[in-house]
Amino acid sequence: MRTQTKIALIFFLVSLSTIIFLSASVYYFIIRYSFSDFYKRLEIRGVVTAKAILDEEEASSAVLQEVRELHLEKLPEEQEYFFEITPAKDFAAEAQTLDIPLSFFENILKNGEATHQNNSTFYAGIKFQSKKGLYAVVVSAENYYNDHHLRYLQNIFLFGILAASIFSFSISIVFSRQVFNPVKEITDRVNEISTQNLHLRLESKKINDEISELETTFNNMLDRLETAFETQNNFISNASHELSTPLTTIIGEADVALAKERNTKEYIESLSVIVNEAERLEKITKSLLFLAQTGFTGSTLKFDKVRIDQLLWDVKETIDKLNPKNKVQLNLSLMPEDPAKLKIKGNEQLLLLALTNIVNNACKYSNNQIVTVSIGTLEEKVIIVVKDSGIGIPENELKFIYDPFFRASNTKEFEGYGIGLPLTRNIVRLHQGEILVSSRVNEGTIVQLTFPVGHYTVG
């Protein structure tokens, strides 16, 4: 059974059960009230009749008889009985004559009143003290309310329940359709989305409900999937180029060298080309392996206390060896007075590699203009900011900067493999840190690295 049908059925059954329960409750209390009211009518008739018949005052008797005839309607099969109460009387014969239980008369004697129902005939009895003596007055009549009014009420309830059932069933179907229409629309829309059109999105109605949350969540998932597919395509495209180029050069150079006998100088030149391309291929392969290793968070690495300010001096020393023409400037003006706030838990070699990549890129893509490296702390976090005035990154390409082998369109004149930044991000993530990159073309790039102060356990 489909969920939509289940909800419609449950809604219908709950509504129908509620209607039947309310109808039955109303019917039950009306019956109770009608029985009580009818007994009260019989008691009033008993009192009026007793006063009119048993009391022998002619004026009072005439008045009471007139009241009875004018204001008390004649009940069907109405009968009045007067039984004198004497000490030795047990009323067994009277009970048998009226076909009512002896307990009826016992209640009159004990409590002063009694009631009894025999099919549609109701009996009400009272103990009445008259001038002639003490009497048990019994009035009986058929309860026409039970025969007519309650039957009419039964028909009304049955018809009402039937009409309410049809209405409730119709509302249940409409309600379930209204609830599941958005889900059906989402299902139809999702079926249209494939790897060929991942740009499609669900139309969010911006209503704060579960369906809107589902649409937003699904759209976010599509964003991640689209990014993942773009990343994969970029990786395949760039990796195939970066890996095939040195291989093609090596194979081509070897074929040229083997095509005919050559002199020693030509062989040396060919071997030099092959060695250079093989070293390039080795660097790319090692970078890929290192990238894969740092991306695997399940691996266990040794983490110690690392002082970030000292690490930056080590980075500066490394950059000086790699690029003597660099103009890296360390800004330590925002350093805290407490050196403990500069300590984080991490792997010093990995952090040195990550920071060196960032600073070296800043120097390279700014043509060795001034690169400022600042350090500070804020709310139990160490912040490092690397700022350059280089070529920058096109805004529409910023989302691809962490894709392996991706290089911005304005970096063709600079040597590189497009692995440094993805590797750096993996290292930062291993240290529970964050990396933010903002850039403008021909204005420069700002890279902000944030690490928590060493109060956590790394596993």
Image (cartoon, grey):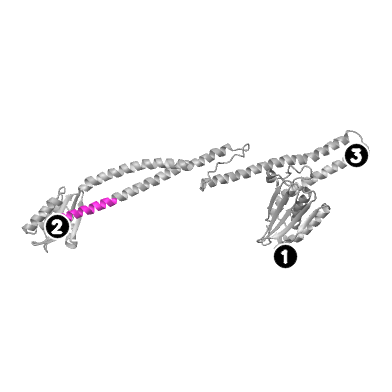
Compute the Cα span from label 2 to label 3: 140 Å
Q: Considering only order in the chain, which callout, 1 or 3, is on the residue closer to the N terminus? A: 3
* Residue nearest the viewer, comparing 433 with 129: 433
Looking at the rendered image, the quarter that the C terminus falls into is bottom right
Q: Mark 3 points at which residue?
A: 267
> Residue 348: x percent and y percent?
75, 58
- In the rendered image, residue 304 lying in the magenta stretch gets the answer no
Vertical position of residue 152 compared to residue 381: above or below: above
Q: What stretch is highlighted in magenta?
A: 28-46
Residue type marked 2 = Val
The label on residue 339 is 1
Residue 47, numbered circle: 2
- The answer to whether mark 3 and mark 1 are in CB contact below 8 A is no
Task: Classify residue 251 by image quadrant.
Answer: top right
Q: Can residue 116 be seen in this view?
A: no
Task: Give me the residue at 80% from left, 37% from top.
Answer: 248
Q: Is residue 58 above or below residue 240?
A: below
Disc 2 crowd, CA 10 A, few/some/many (<14, 14-19, 20+) = some
